[in-house]
Amino acid sequence: MKNLKIKFKCLCDFAEGFSKSLKNLGSDPHRDWRILSVLFLIVFIIVVFFSYRFLWTSSGNSFVLSDEIAPARSSDLNISDLNKVLNYFNDREKRLVNLESSWSSYVDPSI
């Protein structure tokens, strides 16, 4: 228990160094080193975390699906909504083909 109190006191003393204003930066070298070491530790943890995430993602582990895929049930599929979506995209395709084939008569503003 005494050991825990000593560690807690050290943490309180450590945190007390951060409570001083930044105007005194450079006046207490021990406090400055504490600030630099904590900032370095925070940056190091962030770099390690993002490096791990990058390596985990680039290895393909984040996009692995299980082999068991539930079969689609006919009750999950609404045919009328599906037909509406298909008709919408068919109409868009027809309009695109119509626009591509039609001759546009734009006037050149530079003339």
Image (tube, helix red, strand yellow):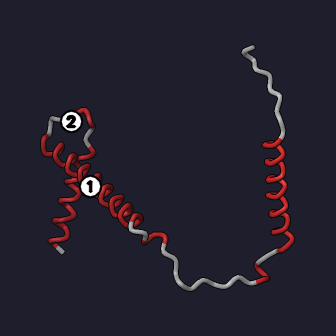
Identify the disc placed on residue 3: none
Q: Nearer the viewer, residue 17 or 43?
A: 43
Q: Position of residue 18 (x, y in %)?
A: 25, 46
Name the residue that disc number 1 marks. 44
- Is disc 1 placed on a helix, strand or loop? helix
Q: Residue placed at 76% from the left, 79% from the top?
A: 76
Q: Position of residue 63 (x, y in %)?
A: 49, 70
Q: Position of residue 73 (x, y in %)?
A: 74, 84
Residue type beneath disc 1: Phe
Identify the disc placed on residue 25: 2
Asked whether, in this view, residue 31 is left or right of residue 98, the answer is left
Q: Residue placed at 34% from the left, 61% from the top?
A: 49
Residue type beneath disc 2: Leu
Residue 14 vertical position relative to residue 85 in the rendered view, above or below: above
Number of disc labels: 2
Q: Residue placed at 82% from the left, 33% from the top?
A: 104
Mark 1 surroundings within 10 Å by alpha-carbon count, few (fewer than 14), some (14 through 19), many (20 or more): few
Cα separation between marks 2 and 1: 23 Å
Q: Quadrant of the N terminus?
A: bottom left
Asked whether, in this view, residue 73 is left or right of residue 8, the answer is right
- Is disc 2 placed on a helix, strand or loop? loop
Asked whether, in this view, residue 78 is left or right of residue 18, the answer is right
Q: Nearer the viewer, residue 25 or 46?
A: 46
